[in-house]
Amino acid sequence: MLCAILVADGVFSSGFTLLHDTLSVAEVLRHTHDPAVPEIRVMVVGEQPIVRTGSGLAIPTTARLDDLAAADVVVVPALGALDESGMVDALDRPGTSRMASALADLDRSSGLVAAACTGTFVLAEAGLLSGRRATTSWWLNSLFARRYPDTELDADRMVVKDRDVLTAGAAFAHI
């Protein structure tokens, strides 16, 4: 199973590293717990060779946006936004816009797309949450509801799965 973690400048360091560590550890543990589970491979997808988190951590990417189509699972970690204006600014960044465009262009006939915390806004920008149920960061529920009225926001749930799209709320709900 090829898992893509989709990153752009400003991503939360912990959002990225926690996902990467979880998937990497799952691959190691799958050998002893259930070798029948397909191999878990992780690629870090970004539009530049190095992406910087909001706190300055350098993340080397291993694949480009054009490589997303090969992934079985695509995950968008939290963008570094702490309030509504910060979220709007993050969505207006060229790198975030290109991530949303790449997601919108994916063939949705197979695979899973997921996002955690403020990363759910990228899925909504891509149109992937239109007509679906989703959750997001509790402190941005109002902005999400105003910006994406065609998405049924389930703010009381930490994780919402609607067919092939999975969304998780704030602060490590994605784990």
Image (tube, rainbow, N blue to C red):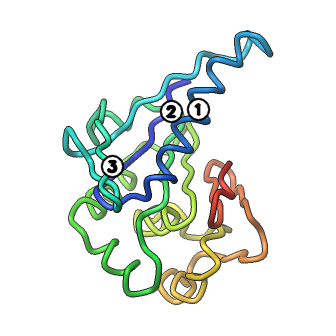
Identify residue for label 1.
23
Q: Residue at x 60, y 73 (%)?
A: 137
Number of residues whose C-alpha sits closer than 10 Å to that of mark 2, classed few (under 14), some (14–19) or many (20 or more): many
Which amino acid is tagged 2? Answer: Cys
Q: Is residue 43 left or right of residue 168?
A: left
Q: Position of residue 116 (x, y in %)?
A: 57, 58
| Total marks placed | 3
3D distance between C-alphas at marks 2 and 1: 8 Å
Secondary structure under the numbered disc 3 in the rendered image: loop
| In this rendering, the label closer to the viewer, 3 or 2 | 3
Identify residue for label 2.
3
Q: Name the image quarter holding the N terminus.
A: top right
Which amino acid is tagged 1? Answer: Leu
Q: Residue at x 57, y 85 (%)?
A: 145
Q: Residue at x 48, y 62 (%)?
A: 119
Q: Are marks 3 and 2 in contact (CB under 8 Å)?
A: no
Identify residue for label 3.
57
Front residue of 150/136: it is 136
3D distance between C-alphas at marks 1 and 3: 19 Å
Q: Are marks 2 and 1 in contact (CB under 8 Å)?
A: yes
Secondary structure under the numbered disc 2 in the rendered image: strand
Q: Earlier in the sequence, mark 2 or mark 1?
A: 2
Q: Earlier in the sequence, mark 3 or mark 2?
A: 2
Q: Is residue 8 left or right of residue 29?
A: left
Secondary structure under the numbered disc 1 in the rendered image: helix
